[in-house]
Image (cartoon, coloured by chain):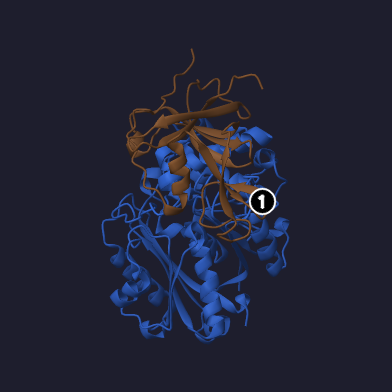
Amino acid sequence: MAKALNDTFGIKRAIKHFDFSEPYWECTRQKKLVIQYCKTTGKYQHFPRPVSIFTGKRRDIEWREVSGKGVVFSYTIAHRGTPLFRGTEPYAVANVTLDVGVNFIANLINCTVEEIKVGMKVKPHWHPLEDGTHLLMFQPDKDPA
Amino acid sequence: MALRDNAIVAYAETKVMEKSDRDVFVLAGEMLEALLDETGTDKNEIDGLVMAGLTGTGAANPFWAQTTADVLGLEVGFCEQVHTGGCSAAGCVARAAAAIDYGMCEVAFLLFADTHVLEDRTDHSHSYRREWTDPYGLMGPPGAFGLLSRAYEAKYGLDYRMLGKLAVTQRNHALMNENACEKLRVPITIDDYMNSRMIADPIRLLDCVMRADGAAGLMMMSRKRAREKGLTKCIIPIGYAERTNFKGGENLVDVTKSGHEICGRKALGAAGLGINDIASFHPYDDFIIAIMLQLEAFGFCRPGEGVRFIRDHDFSYSGDLPLNTGGGQISAGQAACSSHNLVEAVRQLRGEGGKRQVMDTRNALVTGIGWINYGRNWGSSAALVLVPE
């Protein structure tokens, strides 16, 4: 029998933002995923930084909207949650390589333990938070390519 | 003057405790007293205090080293806290040697005292965790090593029973170490390892280090001064390197590779040794797989061959590559600012390993791993090569 994973929707999350990642959170209000892009090197970076990690310059950073589609690079099944998540185990946390070449760690939902595989295609799921922003999660992408 | 002109002239260590029954400053005082007694040194000769920044109890106090100097009545020309996480202990040796070389101090007291079970003031909130991992319930180091282990498994395959072999070897060493935490001094088998409950699948309970309280200390001075004082059981650092934020200016990296590749080459190069010359190995162990990744990174075997290497070698104190002969942190307890494996290497090279004494005491390789970064492996790597005088 497939092992059920908790979608963690019931967790009350109050996230304190860094000022330099605020553009990310603002865009999630419209369920838009933006990732930092370095204008000089043409590369994306995540998590958000106050500078380009490639050049060290603040002025090189801009935000670009991306699809949020990617593949599972790695995953772990939490059987012992953090204090806030205790009682919701087991749940999945995946490190997903987005199609623009950054890794993004998030909960993986709408699948069983048996279905999760490194390399599987995933797409975004936006989970609403109380402050009007959304939390990016991932779910299996079964759409034809 | 150079690194190898300096000597570790003495070590001290408390028993590792599940929870300390005395204040961290009492533990610090015990280390000071033991080192003074052992070396016949007057308190006023100590003019350097070098402490690991990896402290839970002192984490909220920006004046921790100064506070400690004050509590112990030490007047020093060099007062330092080393902030490379689990690399701090080895980092203290290198920085003390540099300070002695530079003339900032002559006799350094290296202090690794922490009671992070009794009183933990650690706060990770001003970091990526608050936005990018805490909202997803990724549990700190076990979660990060769960992701790392699965990525390794996907790339190379992973026979978890061989990780179990390392866990059993370390546990057997802890059984012979009276300073190891009593709670952990229980025999285990590979089946016990495999059947231990999942924490962050594929990380099991017996993969994980257990936080514990305790202290250790070292005394360092120039070899010249050690000779003048008639101290003969000296341990010499002959190679050291550290790397923080390996490939930190890149985006997608191979998480099975770490700064240890660089540290190993540099430290062994300075020591004039090849990896196959290493007589005993004392790798940082917060999770069992970290040991295997280091076997690969330092070149004991090629990348992806860690499992085969573990299968083919005997890592017990009497084996062909003695490893963490005090039990490692995983079987002795993560105490004393993660200095346990360093102190054990010093003990072994002095021939004071008791019933777990290694045969070959020509040298020892000690390593560090510090901090957990976002979706990679770890923040700092360190390597220290020691030889007896």
Residue in the foreground of this view, choosing between B202 and B227: B202
Residue in the foreground of this view, choosing between B74 and B343: B74
Q: What residue type is labelled 1?
A: Ala
Q: Which residue is drawn at 42% across and 25% down?
A: A7
Q: Seen in the image, is B4 located left or right of residue B231?
A: right
Q: Which residue is drawn at 57% across and 85% down?
A: B224
Residue B319 can be seen, yes or no: no
Residue A119 can be seen, yes or no: yes
Count all numbered tags in the image, as a single digit. Answer: 1
Q: Quarter of the image holding residue B149?
A: top right
What is the display colour for chain B? blue
Residue B337 percent across, percent down from the top left? 42, 59
Residue in the foreground of this view, choosing between B56 and A45: A45
Q: Is residue A4 above or below residue B229?
A: above
The quadrant of the rendering that contains the C terminus of chain A is: top right
Label 1: which secondary element: helix
Reading the image, the residue beneath label 1 is B297
Q: Seen in the image, is B311 located left or right of residue A59?
A: right
Q: Residue at x 70, y 41 (%)?
A: B305
Q: Quarter of the image holding residue B102?
A: bottom right
Residue A58 percent across, percent down from the top left? 55, 60
Residue B240 percent across, percent down from the top left? 61, 67
Q: Is residue A107 above or below residue B272?
A: above
Residue A35 percent across, percent down from the top left? 55, 44
Residue in the foreground of this view, choosing between A124 and B314: A124
Q: For mark 1, name the chain.
A: B
What is the display colour for chain A? brown
Q: Work out which residue is located at the far top of the displayed protein and give it.
A: A1
Mark 1 Cα shell of 10 Å, populated few (<14), some (14-19), many (≥20): many
Q: Work out which residue is located at the far front of the displayed protein and give it.
A: A30
